[in-house]
Image (cartoon, rainbow, N blue to C red):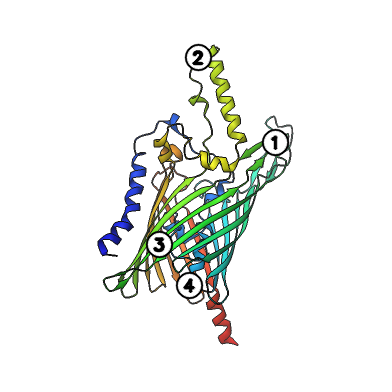
Amino acid sequence: MSMNKLIKAALLPIFLCFFVSGTAFADSPKDDFNPIQTGVNSLNIAPDARGASMGDLGVATDPDANSQYWNPSKYAFAYGKGAASLSYTPWLRKLVNDIFLANLAGYWKLGSGDNQALSASLRYFSLGEVTTSYPDGTQNAQTINPYEMSFDVGYSRKLSEKFSMGVVFRYIYSDLGFRDTEVSGQSSGASAFAADIAGYYTTYPIIGRNECQFSWGWNISNIGTKVSYNDGEDPAFLPTNLRLGTSFMFPLADYHNLAISLDLNKLLVPTRPREKDYVTAEENTPENIEQQKEYTDALEKWENMSPITGIFKSFTDAPGGFSEELKEITWSLGAEYNYNQQFFLRAGYFYENAMKGNRQYFSVGAGFSLNVLRLDAAYMMATAQTSPLDQTLRFTLTFDMDGLRDLFGRRK
């Protein structure tokens, strides 16, 4: 592959992301604000500092202990025998100080050929301490501790020297903390089951005298049941997500490498019908009554829609047509510099259309690696000064199993 062709292939997705977001740069009236609604939204929070520091991406970057979230199929190409990581994120720190996300993840290679791996992760999202009471004050206030959590296991395998696939099975639990149905209507936590399916392709082209790395990846995550709040009366779709991405790594000099990566995301969840899209006639007119019925029928159909049907429906159901479907695509662009795989500097940008949530922020981060452990940190800077996501920090500590084994082996 020639240098020009390789550069064009690497940059094409980057130009595509600007084309996708370019349709959304026009100012959107508040009435057009139409984000996709899901349950257990904490599943969409990036758990680790490395991916977060590059604008929340990781579907095609080099595999690490946290690939379970980004792309579990990457584990089959992991360099070490195994690794485990612990991540901590204080969430919405500009508003409160007791909301956080904790994540534990890891993998272990199977067999002597290093062609397959088992992986697992456990995430816990605490919504802090909340005090509630009856509106009329007839009952004493109660303190609750709502949280969401998930546990999953995965398996990945190389199908060729350059391509691998992986699957993950996940249990999800969301507990809003309420137990008195007269106060909240929520009598117990809500459970759900989901699965991920992913693929990863990587190759090492020679450009000049240097060996580079060119990778593609995809991951369809959280394909599963609905999460049923209020004893099944209010079912919500899981945040089923399609992630596509590419990464291109090239050496700058001996021991100096730079990787540029891009991720595109789209929630595979149908858009909830809005009354204003159906009801336009004046009240108490025959036309208004008919439109109200159409809206009620559409809402009932959406509530009863199966998750699998919703996945296919999500590509064509936006009220604004194809242009609005494009606005549902978020993109992340990031870069990672490393010196001899021991010192890392990272930066990235995340974009979401104002009509679909308006999350837009820069991120930076750094990390250093020793024989046994690696420490990474990330810092988010929202472009909107009023954003509660501004100044978000993440920390990740990763332990390398090969290093630990060698360390204890020398002590013996």
Element type at marker 4? loop
Of mark 1 and mark 3, the one earlier in the sequence is: 1
Element type at marker 3? strand
Q: Which mark is residue 215?
A: 3
- Which image quarter holds the C terminus? bottom right
In this view, the mark in front (4 or 2): 4
Q: Residue 307, located in which quarter of the rendered image?
A: top right
- Taking 277 as reference, is 127 above or below it? below
| Amino acid at the residue labelled 4 | Tyr
Relative to 75, is 53 on the left or the right?
left
Of mark 2 and mark 3, the one earlier in the sequence is: 3
| Amino acid at the residue labelled 3 | Ser
Q: Which mark is residue 185?
A: 1
Of mark 4 and mark 1, the one earlier in the sequence is: 4
Determine the residue located farthest toward the front in the rendered image. Answer: 160
Relative to 230, is 52 on the left or the right?
left
Q: Which mark is residue 79?
A: 4
Q: CA distance from mark 2 to mark 1?
A: 34 Å
Of mark 3 and mark 4, the one earlier in the sequence is: 4
Q: CA distance from mark 2 to mark 3?
A: 56 Å
Q: Residue at x 55, y 23 (%)?
A: 294
Tag 4–tag 1 contact (CB < 8 Å): no
| Amino acid at the residue labelled 1 | Gly
Q: Crowdedness of circle 4 by 10 Å Cα count: few (<14), some, many (20+)?
A: few
Q: CA distance from mark 4 to mark 1?
A: 50 Å
Q: Crowdedness of circle 3 by 10 Å Cα count: few (<14), some, many (20+)?
A: many
Question: Which residue is nearer to you in this view: 407 or 150?
Answer: 150
Q: Which mark is residue 282?
A: 2
Of mark 4 and mark 2, the one earlier in the sequence is: 4
